[in-house]
Amino acid sequence: MKKVYFACSIRGGRDDAEWYGELVGIAKKYSEVLTEIFADKKLTADGMQKPTGEIWSNDIKWIGQADAIIAEVTNPSLGVGYEINAAEKMGKPVLCLFRPENGRKLSAMISGSPGTSVFEYTDLATAEHAIATFMSNVRVHQLA
C-alpha cells in the first residue's frame, strides 16, 4: 500500500483542523497516512508534547518512509514549508492543497516550486478529485 505523509499547520495555527481531518479521511482511501495524528482535532497549536529534536527526527523519518507528501497549505506554516522542501530533496512527489478564500495568497516559494503540484480547492469533492488523481501517479517506494 502507498504511504503518505500528510502535512498541515500545527504551531502555525489550528483554524483549519476540521479540513485536515476530512482531507486525511480522503487520503486514507488511497494510501496509508503516516501522520494521521496531525489532523486530530484535539491537537492544539502547542503541538506534540515532545522535545523539538525528537519531533524533527520523527517527521524526517516519516517523510523518508512516505511515497508522497500531501500538504494542506492554506494556513501559512514554517514547518510545512520545511517539510515540503525536505520531501523535494528526497525526490518525493508533493501535492499542496490550497483554498484561495478571504484574499489568501499562497507563498511564491510553494506555488513556484517545480517539484510541487499545487491544487486550489473550495470543497471536499474537488480536493478528493485532486488527491485521487495525484495518488494514481504515485509509485510505491522500493527500498534498495
Image: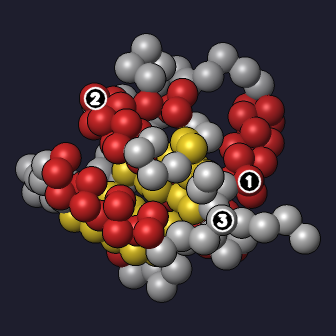
84 on left or right of 53: left
On screen, residue 140 above or below 65: below
Task: Inspect this view and state whether residue 44 appears.
Answer: no
Relative image position of residue 96 (x, y in whole percent): 39, 62
Dot 1 amino acid type: Gln
The residue at 66%/17% (across/down) is 49
Looking at this view, name the residue that lies furthest to the left.
Answer: 102
The residue at 71%/66% (across/down) is 141
Identify residue for label 1: 65
Identify residue for label 3: 140
Count of numbered circles on the image:
3
Residue neighbourhood size for the residue with mark 3, other residues' Cα within 10 Å, grouped as few (<14), some (14–19), many (≥20): few
Mark identifier at residue 18: 2
Q: What whole-number distance in Å separates the C-alpha atoms at marks 2 and 1? A: 26 Å
46 on left or right of 96: right
Reading the chain from its start, which is encountered first: label 1 or label 3? 1
61 on left or right of 107: right
Which type of secondary structure does the marked residue at label 2 adopt?
Answer: helix
Dot 3 amino acid type: Val
On screen, residue 35 above or below 67: above
Most foreground residue, 105 or 71: 71
